[in-house]
Image (tube, rainbow, N blue to C red):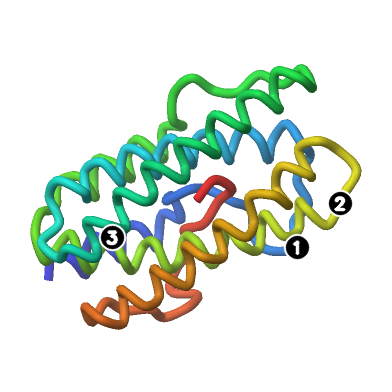
């Protein structure tokens, strides 16, 4: 029951990473800031999951998020420096709240809540990154295009693990996506 309340909170708050709804264009600065904050959240959640999840596949997915999003965050920092954008040094408040909610969970409860959130999050991220990449006019757009295949592979793996452990993978259960997953 606690897992359902947690997922309901995430869905109703729309906070996992805060991306705009599909079709809402973002400028480079807003996209990069959202991606940076979301990337920080992915890394911190991944560390928590790698230590506290009960399923070895969920733990491995958390480790992959730390590795892949850590690398993407570093690459985005370089892009931001080259184009004169300032990225946040800390997560947005809503991302901190999301981390606090999920980091309170352990074991199987964490497994299902995290994987459900990761499916929803990566569905939205793939859409947001694809839209940004399609602009194809700036270095931020090109970074989004380079990052998109990794996010698509994250989504496929998250869906497979969620199915394996019985997490809800209902698409559209809540707006939880944002650039950066």
Q: Earlier in the sequence, mark 3 or mark 2?
A: 3
Secondary structure beneath label 1: loop
Secondary structure beneath label 3: helix
Residue 23, numbered label: 1
Q: Which residue is mark 2?
A: 135
Q: Earlier in the sequence, mark 3 or mark 1?
A: 1
| Residue 124 pos. (x, y %) | 56, 62
Residue found at the far right of this picture: 137
| Residue 131 pos. (x, y %) | 76, 58
Secondary structure beneath label 2: helix
Contact, CB < 8 Å: mark 3 with mark 1? no
Circle 2 Cα neighbour tier, 10 Å, few/some/many (<14 / 14–19 / ≥20): some
Residue at the location (54% across, 23% down)? Answer: 88
Residue 114, numbered label: 3
Q: CA distance from mark 1 to mark 2?
A: 12 Å
Residue at the location (46% across, 32% down)? Answer: 92
């Amino acid at each position: 029951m606690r897992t359902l309340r947690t997922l309901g909170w995430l869905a109703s708050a729309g906070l996992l990473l805060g991306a705009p709804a599909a079709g809402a264009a973002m400028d480079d600065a807003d996209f990069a800031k959202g991606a940076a904050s979301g990337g920080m959240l992915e890394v911190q959640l991944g560390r928590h999951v790698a230590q506290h999840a009960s399923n070895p596949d969920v733990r491995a997915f958390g480790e992959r998020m730390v590795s892949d999003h850590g690398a993407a965050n570093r690459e985005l920092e370089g892009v931001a420096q080259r184009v004169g954008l300032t990225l946040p040094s800390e997560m947005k408040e809503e991302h901190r709240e999301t981390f606090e909610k999920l980091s309170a969970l352990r074991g199987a409860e964490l497994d299902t809540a995290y994987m459900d959130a990761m499916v929803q999050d990566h569905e939205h991220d793939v859409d947001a990154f694809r839209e940004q990449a399609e602009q194809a006019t700036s270095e931020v757009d090109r970074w989004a295009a380079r990052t998109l295949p990794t996010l698509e592979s994250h989504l496929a793996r998250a869906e497979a693990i969620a199915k394996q452990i019985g997490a809800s993978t209902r698409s559209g259960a809540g707006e939880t996506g944002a650039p950066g997953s």
